[in-house]
Image: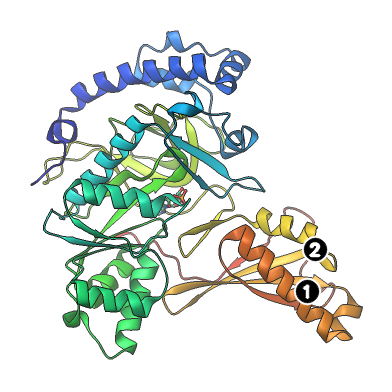
Amino acid sequence: MKYWQEREETMSVEEREAFQLERLQTTLNRAYENVDFYSRKFREVGADPSTVKDLKDIANMPFTTKQDLRDNYPYGMFAVPLRDIVRIHSSSGTTGKPTVVGYTKADLENWKDLVARLFIAGGADQNDIVHIAFTYGLFTGGFGLHYGAEHIGASVIPVSSGNTGRQINIMQDYRSSVLISTPSYALHIAETLEKQGLTKDDIHLRLGMFGSEPWGQKIREEIEEKLGVIATDNYGLSELMGPGVAGECLEKKGLHVNEDHFLMEIIDPETLKPLPLGEKGELVITTLKREAMPLIRYRTRDITRLYREECPCGRTLIKMEKPCGRTDDMLIINGVNVFPSQVEEVLEKVQGASPHYMLIVTKKGALDDLEIQIEVSEALFFDEMKKQRTLMEELTKLFQQGLLIKPKVKLVMPKSLDRFEGKAKRVIDKRPVACDYE
Ligand code: DLL
């Protein structure tokens, strides 16, 4: 099978634009009528959905930000009553509250189809044994890819994340043929294989579909070499649905955007004005078919470029360059999104920790490693080892709860971290740049 939904994936650009416009108008009206936040916002900025007669008119509509989602926590962005919601996922918010995402039955059907498109474009079929090493839970990666893989008829192993030795045993015994994970976890599996004295010939993988964090050509080549797979990239974000927004075909030259479901724009993050096709800037997405939670001009903060080129695979869907870099301070650590402000929040809750901190991100083998350095009082630093240990343990526990990853906590001398007159620099990211464009 070459396509999952051939008509949608290969229709002419003009035909698709007509669809997009019709769906855009419906979406704008539904958001305006059914979501208080949008009724208010549209009125505030004087935007009238009925004036949208062309796709370009989207530029007159207001933006939506992560902060808006947070302000309307938990269900304020829903355009349907709660009884029509059949699934809820969430992701980390900039501070405190997570962003909540709801799906109706129809949304889940669409999600399955869009992820199925990814699998078919990435070369998988019903004969494959799909090994899903994304976390199952509130994170959209596990469940999102799971149902799409089942939808194409593949055999799905919901391994979830962690315990790499066991993952390898399962791969060997169950003959997993497609690996689904972050690219860094794929490399970690490769390194663990090596440590066990095994090679790609001892496993049965043929494809790898990776996403959730930036990665470049060098990492791709390493994964392909060490795991014996063809590795494709796929992109998505929880607020918009999860995985399934865009993905590469076997040509591996740019990600095809499912633009019959998502209208993409690139804006200048400073002026907020739309940029011409082909220019690099911040990706802004409007949902076109989503029932539960229509989002208008959602600012993803991801930096990328959109372009049209004929693809030998026959898909006419617009392409997106691998996203690399963000216009905010969000870090992606082993696929988990972390905002420095989340660290600040934890520190506010803990007696004995000062608000002066620094995040140091490094690579340990294939995986990312986060150290949080925190200044403590002189008395605590010099005299009281037991108190220090208790504080470190408490902080580690709270960070683990708040950030969903376990950082290394290091207490440092008072006034030893840099002070800033302007914008504080709270992050030292020592990882090699992931995106090396070919
Ligand atoms: O990471 C959804 C997903 C799951 C995508 C599994 C692909 C596979 P969030 O946790 O909300 O959702 O994180 C979204 O991760 O805004 C990007 O900054 C980054 N990101 C996701 N995919 C890619 C990718 C999922 N292929 C945020 N390349 C996004 C670069 C990516 N960055």
Point out the residue furthest to the right here. 379
Check disc 1: other Cα within 10 Å, few if <14, some if 14-19, many if 20+.
many
* Up/down of 254 relative to 26, above or below: below
User: Which residue shows up at 57% across the image and 48% down it?
Assistant: 328
* Up/down of 435 relative to 317, above or below: below
* Disc 2 within 8 angstroms of ligand 1 (CB): no
Query: Which numbered circle lies on residue 24?
Result: none
Amino acid beneath label 1: Leu
Disc 2 versus disc 1: distance between alpha carbons? 8 Å
Q: Nearer the viewer, residue 167 or 202?
A: 167
The C terminus: image quadrant? bottom left
Give the percent coordinates (x, y) of residue 355.
80, 61
Point out the residue furthest to the bottom here. 197
List the residue tagged with mark 2. Answer: 350
Amino acid beneath label 2: Val
Check disc 2: other Cα within 10 Å, few if <14, some if 14-19, many if 20+.
some
* Number of numbered markers: 2
Query: Which numbered circle lies on residue 391?
Result: 1
Give the percent coordinates (x, y) of residue 78.
51, 28
Point out the residue furthest to the left here. 1
User: Which residue shows up at 16% across the image and 81% down it?
Assistant: 201
Give the percent coordinates (x, y) of residue 148.
26, 47
Q: Quadrant of residue 294?
A: top left
Position of 169 compared to 86: left or right?
A: left
Can residue 294 be seen in this snapshot? no
Q: Nearer the viewer, residue 243 or 303?
A: 243
> Helix, strand, or loop for circle 1?
helix
Do residues under tags 2 and 1 come within 8 Å of each other at their CB atoms?
yes
Q: Quadrant of residue 203?
A: bottom left
